[in-house]
Image (spheres, rainbow, N blue to C red):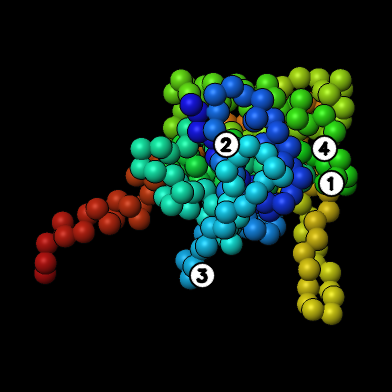
Amino acid sequence: MLRILVTNDDGIDALGIKRLVEALLALEQAEIFVVAPVEEKSGVGHGVTYRTALAPEKRDFYGLPVKAWAVNGNPADCVKAAYHLLFAADEKPDIVFSGINVGTNLGRDIYYSGTCSGAREAVILGVPGVALSYDNWFDQENYGDVVQMIGPLVKEFSERASKGELPPDVFWNVNIPHVPLAQVKGIVPAALSLHHYEDRYSKEAEGYFLTREYPQVMPLAEPFDYDLVKHDYIAVTPVHIDATDRALLAQMDGWPLMQAWEKRGEEPDE
């Protein structure tokens, strides 16, 4: 039986994670475990908890046939704690799904996203990870046809995970447009976009709060996630865990600093 771990960054009581579990319950021969933050942890990136004791709390999850725990930590904490504390050594999860996030995680958003960190942490632990986000930031209680939209996706990823067909060094970033199912134009592979936000800080009584304007988009020659989602496609992006620039790494051997350091001790003493 396939063991599926589910987490998110909007908190265990968020509607998005319930919708994700509903889609996963349609799978045959799957045992589902929900381990999610006790409260919203949006934008925490890949932060983990060191100086506060984690205390997973067993929960009922909407009366659905799953095992669930709420954790006083971040999404990466939830995956890490589930892997080490809640699963037996010989019964680790076969795949981790993180989401469904309120709002997209496109392009450089993946570095800030708690949703993406849940999937990334899974891959760090040797388990396939999939992050799912929905473009419903301005209509957060409306998940429309999202269960039907992601049904084929979670089935595909789960089947590939069960056969060992997903690469060990990649997590998958899925972004879903906020349109009815009939208007979705397709599920397509997409590069991460290079858009950036215009950061602004607003002064309130407590201090300054970060607000973000609509992103400035840099055009690319290839299909990229931001544009595809805005044109009603479901975008799927494989994201490498190894972020090393191999080409630049090779060039660095020619840097004078590197060469000078290697020649230390070659000059004769006077």
Q: Earlier in the sequence, mark 3 or mark 2?
A: 2
Q: Percent position (x, y) of residue 187?
A: 72, 22
Q: Label 2: how many residues lie within 10 Å, few (<14), some (14-19) or many (20+)?
A: many
* Front label number (4 vs 2): 2
Q: Percent position (x, y) of residue 145?
A: 82, 29
Label 3 with label 4: CB-CB less than 8 Å: no
Vertical order, 77 against 66 (above or below): below
Q: Percent position (x, y) of residue 125?
A: 43, 43
Residue identified by numbered label 2? 32
Q: Label 4: how many residues lie within 10 Å, few (<14), some (14-19) or many (20+)?
A: some
Q: Earlier in the sequence, mark 3 or mark 4?
A: 3
Residue identified by numbered label 3? 52
Cα gap from disc 4 to disc 2, whole angstroms: 21 Å
Q: Which mark is residue 25?
A: none
The amino acid marked with disc number 1 is Gln
Label 3 with label 2: CB-CB less than 8 Å: no
The residue sitting at 77% across, 59% down in the picture is 199
The amino acid marked with disc number 2 is Ile
The residue sitting at 46% across, 20% down in the picture is 163
Q: Which mark is residue 143?
A: 4
Q: Earlier in the sequence, mark 3 or mark 1?
A: 3
